[in-house]
Each structure stands twice: as structure tokens, then as C-alpha cells.
Amino acid sequence: MIRPGLTFLLWLAIAAFVVLNDFVGDTWIAAALSVRAVEWYKVLVPAPYAVMMAVIHARRTMGPNWFEAGLLAALLWPVSTVLVDFLYARVTFDEEPAVFLDRFAFWWGAPYLLLELLLFAAPLIAGKLFARQR
């Protein structure tokens, strides 16, 4: 069953966690670690939380339309999380869009793309696993 309200609430939880984690990383953690280590912190800490939200989403949307529900989450969560993260960086640090887009430069070792790929894949993988159990 597709539940857009549930998808939105779980995304809201993910977005709040990502923004709070970025705030902690930019204030407290950044004083002690290098820039690259802080970027990895900002990706690795929310990753298990995003997987947990995907599992919750998959358990609540089991049924014949599990793929559509998972696809809704897979398309909305990464894009909207990038937008919220950009707004956080823009409002807090007056960061230019070009500086924000440098987070996606995986060829320089920027790990931010891993979080976005996880936010895309996790709802689909969890949905498939729970659909198989039924």
C-alpha cells in the first residue's frame, strides 16, 4: 500500500537528523577534525538512521504496491534532502551554490554522494526484502 503521509513523515525525520548532524559537524566536530573527516562524519552518521527509516517504510508499505511506495520514497528522499541541506548551508553560512555542489565531487574524495545513493537505494532494497518475506 502506498502511504504518502508516512513517506513524508519519515523523510521529515531524515531531513531533521541530517540538518542537526550537519550542525554538530560544522560546529563541534569541525574544531577537532580535518575538513575531509568532517565530510565523512556528515555522511556516515546519518547512514544507519536512513536505513532504519527505509526499513520502517518497507514494513508499513508491504503489499502488492510495495514497489510504487519504495519508488516514491527513493525519488523524494534524496532530492528533498539535498534541497534541505542546501538551504541549511545557504542560510547558516551564506554558502554559494557552486560551493555546495563541490560536495558531489566524488573524484576528489567527497563522500556526500554516498548518502544520496543510500537514500535512493535503501527504500527499494528494504521494500524488496520485506516483499519477499510476505
Image: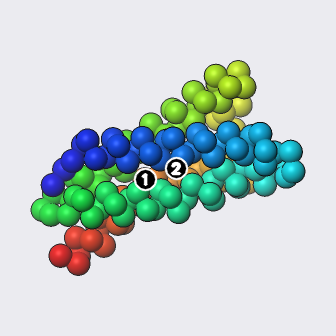
State the image quarter where residue 8 is shown: top left
> In the figure, is residue 66 to the left or right of 97?
left
x, y (%) of residue 6?
Answer: 28, 47
- Mark 2 neighbour class, 10 Å CA radius: few under 14, some 14 to 19, many 20 or more: some
Amino acid type of the residue tagged 2 in the rendering = Glu
- 62 over 75 or under it: above or below: below
Q: Residue at x 30, y 73 (%)?
A: 129
Disc assigned to residue 116: 2
Answer yes or no: is residue 96 visible.
no
Quadrant, the C terminus: bottom left
- 128 over 31 or under it: above or below: below
Q: Are marks 2 and 1 in contact (CB under 8 Å)?
A: yes
Quadrant, the N terminus: bottom left
State how the image is colored.
Answer: rainbow
Disc assigned to residue 120: 1
Nearest the eye: 77 or 92 = 92
x, y (%) of residue 39?
Answer: 72, 49
> In the figure, is residue 60 to the left or right of 43?
left
Where disc 2 sits, the SS reads helix
